[in-house]
Amino acid sequence: MATTTSITASAALKLLDLRLKSTSAILTSAMGEFTAPSQQEIAILRGGGIVELYRIMEDLPEDDEEEEEEEEGRVRLKLVTRVETRSVLRCLSVVRLSGGKRDVLAVGADGGCFTVLDFEGGKGKVLHCPAFGKTGECFLLSFTTFSF
């Protein structure tokens, strides 16, 4: 007599959405002051629904050695935060709200929905995400933020 087994709720299959390697292609970028006033930053939109925020850092040369030649400082990018939206993003634009001292990011998705992201404190926060489409769901509600 054969015994039958059933899958219980505790032993159900769990799915994990994990990317082993992120996309390297940049779709579009925008420059603004997202985390603090007078901090120049670059927002990058990558394929696969990833928004990255980089701060422009300038390393000034040390004044210990006085040379006649003027040396320029090195400019580098530092990753501030990375937002994975789990959706297909198409465009982004920098918006400064009236009376604001920082910029926010308006991101457009494939389905026509747009979301306004705020990066206060270096973490991505959704300010506005209207219900859109037949189901009334917002495409960018679930996102993961990685701070560095």
Image (cartoon, grey):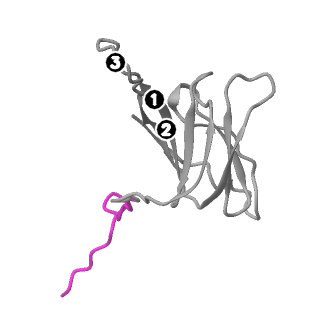
Residue 60, percent from left and from top:
40, 22
Discs 1/3, front:
3
The vertical placement of 36 against 145, above or below, is: above
> Could you classify mark 1 by the number of other residues whose Cα lies within 10 Å: few (under 14), some (14-19), or many (20 or more)?
some
Q: Observer-nearest residue: 121 or 92?
A: 92
Residue 111, percent from left and from top:
70, 63
- State yes or no: residue 67 in magenta: no
Residue 118, percent from left and from top:
63, 34
| Residue 28 seen by the camera | yes
Q: Which mark is residue 106?
A: none
Q: Which residue is mark 2?
A: 54
Residue 39, percent from left and from top:
56, 25
Which residue corresponds to the image point at 39% horizontal and 62% vertical from the top-left? 15
Horizontal arrangement in the rendering, residue 130 relative to residue 78 (left or right):
right
Q: Main secondary structure of the magenta part?
A: loop
The vertical placement of 30 against 37, above or below, is: below
Which residue corresponds to the image point at 67% horizontal and 63% vertical from the top-left? 110
> Could you classify mark 2 by the number of other residues whose Cα lies within 10 Å: few (under 14), some (14-19), or many (20 or more)?
some
Q: Quadrant of residue 74?
A: top left
Type of amino acid at the residue the image marks with label 3:
Glu
Identify the element where label 2 is drawn.
strand
Q: Which residue is mark 3?
A: 67
Type of amino acid at the residue the image marks with label 2:
Tyr
Q: Which residue is mark 1?
A: 57
- State yes or no: residue 9 in magenta: yes
Discs 2/1, front:
1
Residue stretch in magenta: 1-16
- Give the Cα separation between the discs numbered 2 and 1: 9 Å
- Give the Cα separation between the discs numbered 1 and 3: 24 Å
Screen quadrant of the C terminus: top left
> Could you classify mark 3 by the number of other residues whose Cα lies within 10 Å: few (under 14), some (14-19), or many (20 or more)?
few
Horizontal arrangement in the rendering, residue 14 relative to residue 83 (left or right):
left
